[in-house]
Amino acid sequence: MVQHLVRFLQVGGVAFALDAGLLWFLVYQMGVPPILARGFSFVITIAVTFVLNARYTFAASIKESSKSRYILIQCAGSAINFAVYSALVLAGLLGPLWALVVGSFLGSAHNFLMMRRFVFAGATDRPPA
């Protein structure tokens, strides 16, 4: 499990950089409202993380992994992430990037535990390649 967690966190780092970079670009360079920009950055990030988590984190077959469960888990984790992000931004408590940090942390904790159990469960018995 430790190897999976380390790899999940590495994928999360890549995903966070991608998500934050897209968010920054859309908000500060393109003038897209922060909430709308977050939606776009999120969708792209989910697609990338599915492939990375399946192959790198859990050494699972993309074809054999439960994409529907992955999407449902990501949606739940995203709801947590997006709700926290939106609440912090709309309340003026944090700027978009710091709100992203807090939301991402809480959503990621949920996602790891649920993915390990319900999406890539067969792969969790063996160490990542």
Image (spheres, helix red, strand yellow):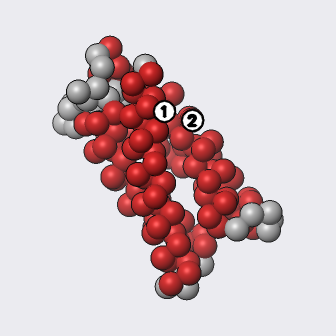
Determine whether, in the image, residue 95 is placed left or right of residue 117: right
Q: Quadrant of residue 55?
A: top left
- Whole-percent x and y of residue 89? 72, 66
Q: Is residue 117 visible?
A: no
- Whole-percent x and y of residue 124? 35, 19
What label does residue 112 carry, if any? Answer: 1
Residue at left offset 30%, top offset 20%? 127
What label does residue 75 carry, if any? Answer: none
Q: Quadrant of residue 115?
A: top left
| Residue 23, placed above or below residue 4 | below
| Residue 28, placed above or below residue 43 | below
Q: Quadrant of residue 69?
A: top left
Q: What's the residue type where badge 1 is placed?
A: Phe
Q: What's the residue type where badge 2 is placed?
A: Ala
Mark 1 to mark 2: distance in Å? 6 Å
Determine whether, in the image, residue 75 is placed left or right of residue 51: right
Is the residue marked by circle 1 packed among few (<14), some (14-19), or many (20+) residues within 10 Å? many
Contact, CB < 8 Å: mark 1 with mark 2?
yes
- Closer to us: 67 or 116: 116
Residue extending furthest top?
125
| Residue 90, placed above or below residue 111 | below
Label 2, secondary structure: give it.
helix
Task: Please name the residue that numbered disc 2 is placed on.
Answer: 109
Residue at left offset 75%, top offset 67%? 90
- Where the N terminus falls, by quadrant? top left
Residue at left offset 34%, top offset 53%? 47
Is the residue marked by circle 2 packed among few (<14), some (14-19), or many (20+) residues within 10 Å? few
Determine whether, in the image, residue 23 is placed left or right of residue 67: right
Q: Is residue 48 visible?
A: yes
- Whole-percent x and y of residue 75? 50, 46
